[in-house]
Image: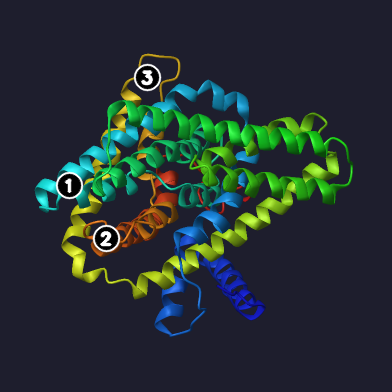
């Protein structure tokens, strides 16, 4: 689909205007973008851009994941690896199970429709989470836990998603096959990202030209993701691995000082562009999506998703309460309410095969859950963080740093 320069200019102009207005009104930028997209759709302004799984996966996810991973410190991440992995595996399974079972028994949905929806809506979305917590100014261990979990749980969801589709379309599913698929998806994605990062770091070490170094980082971000997805591995984990390796080892001589500064600034800007476009497009698509017809089921799923997230977070964190890695109760509250859904869930829903039972209903309910997550949780997240004392009040010296 052609995206000409006029459409790009108009989208960027809207994004910049929303950014200025959101800052003045002290509103979350992502919420402002979504609402702006809805206004654009209601005004019948057409950009001829369709929000698809391919667009989200190929264009938007790689830069957002790479930018977050580039600034993710390895040592603290390694120290909390047990907690993060438990949330990203056991936590996802618990959330998925509660949503799926509740949808089947309370809404009388067939398993063939309840399972795909339960899977794709169970993972927190790295796009929404990273944007919200970065904008709120959250730092330290809390931000690391929230962001890393939202990035790592993609591996679990990718396997569950493929299993759900196989079961729905009549394919064979076995415990051994699921375990093997999980290992291949996760380990393969990590290896793909590591190999791509290694090649980029090797090449970058042979030049001091910051523009060439910048080009290599672009190859690492998109190349690792697309290569992993091509081989049906986890693209999110591949780009996450590449970003962590380049961000933590690039300062050891592989990148020049000017090159590292250029890379950081460039990906911060690209992250802003990707966030702007994706939430504008979500708002535009929301108006066209028939959510009202599935409103009762959507409200039920929203409740199930919240309950599932609560069980996942508080249950998993309870396993570490007597260890050195225990998580403060305030941090658990933030992990619970900060488990936003967004572009990743929409991409998986839109990518469902046409022969999946109740596909249209699944997509409508997914949009309803994402709308609630982006607008309601997005609007309340910053006040919630302030109430818990995790960020400074507005207009305080700390908040302006």
Q: Is residue 113 left or right of residue 215?
A: left
Q: Residues within 10 Å of mark 3 (few under 14, many from 20)?
A: some
Q: Looking at the image, can residue 399 be seen?
A: no
Q: Is residue 389 left or right of residue 293?
A: right
Q: Are marks 2 and 3 in contact (CB under 8 Å)?
A: no
Q: CA distance from mark 1 to mark 3?
A: 33 Å
At 61% from the left edge and 70% from the top edge, which residue is drawn?
16
List the residue tagged with mark 2.
Answer: 359
List the residue tagged with mark 1.
Answer: 111
Q: Is residue 212 left or right of residue 316?
A: right
At 83% from the left edge and 51% from the top edge, which residue is drawn?
211
Q: Are marks 1 and 3 in contact (CB under 8 Å)?
A: no
Q: Secondary structure at mark 1?
A: helix
At 85% from the left edge and 47% from the top edge, which residue is drawn?
210
Q: Point out which mark residue 190 bears.
A: none
* Tag in front: 1 or 3: 1
Whichever of callouts 1 and 3 sits on the residue coming sooner in the sequence is 1
Q: CA distance from mark 2 to mark 1?
A: 13 Å
Q: Secondary structure at mark 2?
A: helix
Percent position of residue 214, x then y: 77, 49
List the residue tagged with mark 3.
Answer: 320
């Amino acid at each position: 689909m052609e995206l000409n320069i006029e459409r790009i200019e108009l989208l960027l102009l809207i994004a910049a205007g929303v950014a200025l207005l959101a800052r003045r009104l002290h509103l979350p930028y992502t919420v402002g973008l979504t609402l702006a997209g809805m206004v654009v759709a209601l005004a019948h302004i057409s950009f001829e851009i369709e929000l698809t799984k391919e667009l989200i996966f190929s264009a938007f996810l790689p830069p957002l994941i790479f930018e977050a991973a580039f600034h993710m410190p390895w040592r603290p991440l390694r120290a909390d690896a047990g907690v993060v992995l438990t949330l990203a595996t056991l936590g996802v399974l618990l959330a998925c199970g509660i949503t799926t079972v509740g949808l089947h028994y309370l809404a009388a949905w067939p398993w063939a429709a309840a399972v795909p929806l339960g899977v794709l809506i169970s993972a927190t979305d790295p796009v929404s989470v990273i944007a919200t917590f970065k904008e709120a100014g959250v730092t330290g261990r809390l931000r690391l836990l929230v962001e890393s979990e939202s990035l790592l749980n993609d591996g679990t969801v990718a396997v569950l998603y493929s299993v759900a589709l196989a079961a729905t379309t009549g394919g064979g599913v076995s415990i051994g096959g699921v375990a093997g698929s999980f290992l291949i998806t996760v380990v393969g994605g990590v290896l793909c990202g590591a190999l791509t990062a290694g090649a980029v770091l090797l090449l970058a070490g042979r030049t001091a030209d910051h523009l060439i170094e910048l080009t290599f980082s672009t190859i690492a971000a998109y190349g690792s993701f697309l290569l992993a997805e091509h081989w049906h591995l986890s693209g999110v984990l591949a780009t996450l691995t590449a970003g962590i390796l380049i961000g933590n080892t690039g300062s050891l001589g592989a990148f020049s000082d000017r090159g590292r500064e250029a890379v950081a600034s460039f990906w911060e800007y690209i992250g802003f562009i990707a966030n702007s476009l994706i939430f504008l497009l979500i708002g535009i698509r929301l108006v066209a999506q028939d959510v009202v017809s599935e409103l009762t089921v959507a409200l039920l799923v929203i409740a199930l998703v919240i309950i599932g997230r609560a069980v996942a977070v508080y249950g998993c964190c309870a396993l570490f309460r007597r260890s050195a890695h225990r998580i403060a109760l305030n941090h658990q509250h933030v992990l619970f309410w900060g488990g936003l859904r967004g572009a990743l869930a929409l991409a998986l829903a839109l990518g469902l095969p046409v022969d999946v039972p109740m596909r249209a209903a699944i997509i409508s309910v997914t949009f309803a859950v994402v709308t609630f997550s982006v607008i309601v949780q997005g609007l309340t997240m910053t006040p919630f963080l302030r109430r818990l004392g995790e960020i400074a009040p507005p207009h305080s010296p700390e908040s302006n740093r």
